[in-house]
């Protein structure tokens, strides 16, 4: 069994993490799943930016962990959750890096949502 590769962000594959100066609300089926003013924006290379929301600002009573796991050599092992309680369950609608690689340690304790499965509203600060 080979070890998983660990890659470090570089000029060829940059990763930045910045505080998001906005109020972010995530809804699924009309119910608020997350509401925060403490999200982080992770920008990885040329990929679309991803909002990471503190788990403390997520209604965890609506979440059910799944057996889905993925691996990113830059970020680490990701675990997934289904959003329950609506008309239909949204399977694997969000993920988290419980123990992310050191280069992205700031996203520990945060979750990210697939924007095509939930409604994400970002109200910019004045």
Image: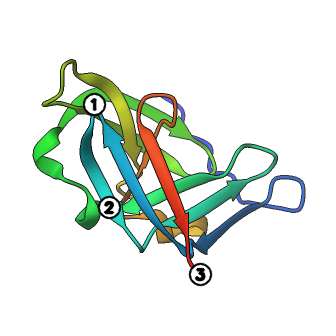
Quarter of the picture containing the C terminus is bottom right
To which residue does mark 3 refer? 126
Disc 3 vs disc 2: Cβ atoms closer than 8 Å?
A: no
Dot label at residue 64: none
Q: Residue 11, image x and y in percent?
A: 89, 62
In primary-sequence order, the first of circles 3 and 2 is: 2
Disc 2 vs disc 1: Cβ atoms closer than 8 Å?
A: no
Q: How far apart are the alpha carbons under marks 3 and 2? A: 18 Å
Q: What is the quadrant of residue 78 in the picture?
A: top left
To which residue does mark 2 refer? 35
Decide: is 17 above or below 125: above
The mark tally for this picture is 3
Q: Residue 72, image x and y in percent?
A: 57, 41
Q: Residue furthest bottom?
A: 126
Q: Nearer the viewer, residue 108 or 50?
A: 50
Residue 104 in the figure: left or right of residue 110: right
């Amino acid at each position: 069994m080979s070890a998983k590769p660990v890659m470090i962000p570089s000029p060829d594959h940059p990763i930045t993490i910045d505080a998001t100066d906005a109020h972010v609300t995530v809804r699924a089926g009309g119910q608020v799943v997350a509401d925060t003013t403490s999200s982080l924006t992770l920008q990885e290379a040329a990929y679309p930016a991803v909002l990471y929301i503190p788990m403390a600002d997520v209604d965890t009573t609506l979440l059910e962990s799944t057996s889905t796991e993925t691996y990113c050599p830059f970020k680490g092992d990701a675990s997934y959750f289904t959003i329950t309680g609506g008309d239909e369950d949204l399977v694997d609608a969000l993920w988290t890096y419980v123990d992310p690689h050191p280069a992205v340690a700031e996203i520990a304790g945060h979750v990210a949502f697939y924007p095509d499965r939930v409604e994400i509203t970002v109200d910019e600060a004045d």
